[in-house]
Image (cartoon, rainbow, N blue to C red):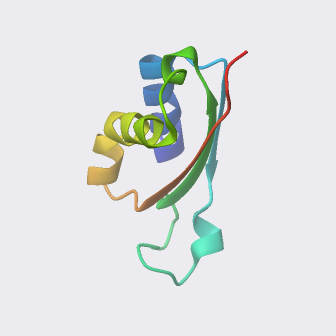
Amino acid sequence: MSVRDQIEATLRAKFDPALLEVIDDSERHHGHAGWREGGNTHFHIKIASTALDGMNRIEQHRAINAALADQFAAGMHALTIKVIPSD
């Protein structure tokens, strides 16, 4: 399973999102810190989940980062998070 697929599976299981987009953004960071050949280092997610409603932005990001601790430990370097209010 790719890192992107692992991230998606983990976030779906943890937050049951109504909207989830996971984009491997690694090539845009070629030559920057944490980048390595083959990608899987920099990701962008967009998520809407009632599980994140009522949290401030810092709490949302902490919850998402905690859920993805295994991916960070395995070499994911950076994650950009966009939380969309669920309606």
Q: State which quadrant residue 14 falls in.
A: top left
Give x and y (percent) for residue 46: 65, 39
Q: In this view, does 49 lie to the left or right of 73?
A: right
Residue at x-position 29% and y-position 42%: 70
Rendered-image quadrant of the C terminus: top right
Q: Which residue is drawn at 47% across and 73% down?
A: 35
Residue 9 drawn above or below residue 7: above
Q: Where is residue 54 in the image (x, y as percent from the top left)?
A: 51, 21
The outermost residue toward the bottom is: 31
| Residue ID at (49%, 73%) | 37
Q: Where is residue 1 in the image (x, y as percent from the top left)?
A: 46, 37
Frontmost residue, 64 versus 6: 64
Q: Residue furthest right?
A: 87
Number of marks in the rendered image? 0
82 w.r.t. 27: above or below: above
**Vertical side of 35 occupied by 53: above or below:** above
